[in-house]
Image: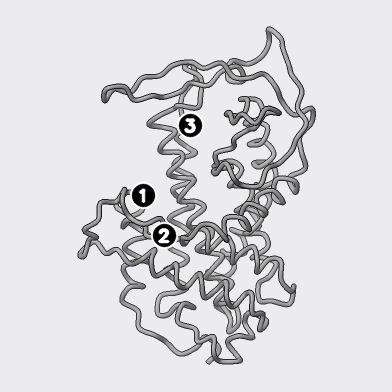
Amino acid sequence: MDYPDNPTLHVDVQDYFGNETPPWLCCWVVMNQVDGQIEFHREESARYALPQLLPAKTLVDWVEKIVTHQDTRNIGFQQAVDAFIMRYSKSSTSLPMHNLVQKVHELNCLTKIRLGLVLCVDEHGKTTAPSCALHTQFGQISKAASQPIEKYVLGELEKLVFGASGIGPSNGIALWASLWCLILMYRKLVRSYIAFQQFPCHVPEDYSGFPECKLEAGTHFYHYLVSIYAALFRATSPLYADLRVAATRKLLNDDDSLVRAFMNLRTESFYFRKSHPEQPSRTPAHQLPERESPWMTAPEDQLLRRMVLDREAELQSKPPLDK
């Protein structure tokens, strides 16, 4: 998925034929750019599918292997967030907000299945797009497993926002990382919906149209999470926690691997936020290093930029979270 050298998932498939096959399981509509003009053509999809749907855990385990693989080969804020959340979820259950982080991690993995580029390799080593049916089945598995987790996670965040007790003295790092994971996840979801709306290159020509409600709902949750983050971390951020202090390290169970993962996350967050609209990089966006993200200028990202990124750039170092 996403990169050809990522860990693979071996599945058994079977061919299917029949006159009643829905058209969206028979072909892709592929977009090409020729002499500056966008052209579409129909490309026949292979006709194979899973004999039965896989357990969601199989797909989560697969994504975890990919996250581990990419953590050693790629750099960037997204990879650092994924790696930290996964490592935290696999660590001691006594860690603060462990159950919430675990659910966020599962939701993140399942969403990557829906939004990632899944490639297939046949017995001859040839890489191709999956059949439309297989792609649809993966989406069905992800969606069915994601819905109860998503409901739980958003419900727990709502309790924090409207509860009287606040974040709590020990929950800052776990909550901060979880919110960033969710913000990036919904941001990618929204961007995928927008791309789907503008360039429907993965659906048949006679597709009935993009459901606008999905884009509206995705954007709402994206902005909702940004607002929660901005409200909870208005004055300080776990980025400034002093991990040399024993009491602060205890927030990560004094686990050296977790501490290193968080330090890496802190470093990557700097590169993620370093470009400023008033001080734009002189390097064109497409030539920026992989770890350096161009400043967010899309309309759907303005709330994140204004309420989080601009404000965090002005924060000064604060005392450790445990003080």
Q: Secondary structure at mark 3?
A: loop
| Residue 300 marker | 1
Query: Disc 3 marks which residue?
Result: 211
Residue 31, compared with residue 22, is above or below; it is: below
Residue 188, compared with residue 244, is above or below; it is: above
Q: Which residue is situated farthest in the front direction here?
A: 124
Q: How many marks?
A: 3
The quadrant of the image that shows the N terminus is top right
Q: Front-most of 276 and 198?
A: 276
| Residue 291 marker | 2
Between discs 2 and 3, the one toward the N terminus: 3
How far across and how far down the image is residue 233, in percent? 45, 74
Q: Secondary structure at mark 2?
A: loop
Q: CA distance from mark 1 to mark 3?
A: 18 Å
Q: Residues within 10 Å of mark 3 (few under 14, many from 20)?
A: few
Q: CA distance from mark 2 to mark 3?
A: 33 Å
Indicate how the structure is coloured in the image. one colour
Q: Amino acid at mark 2?
A: Arg
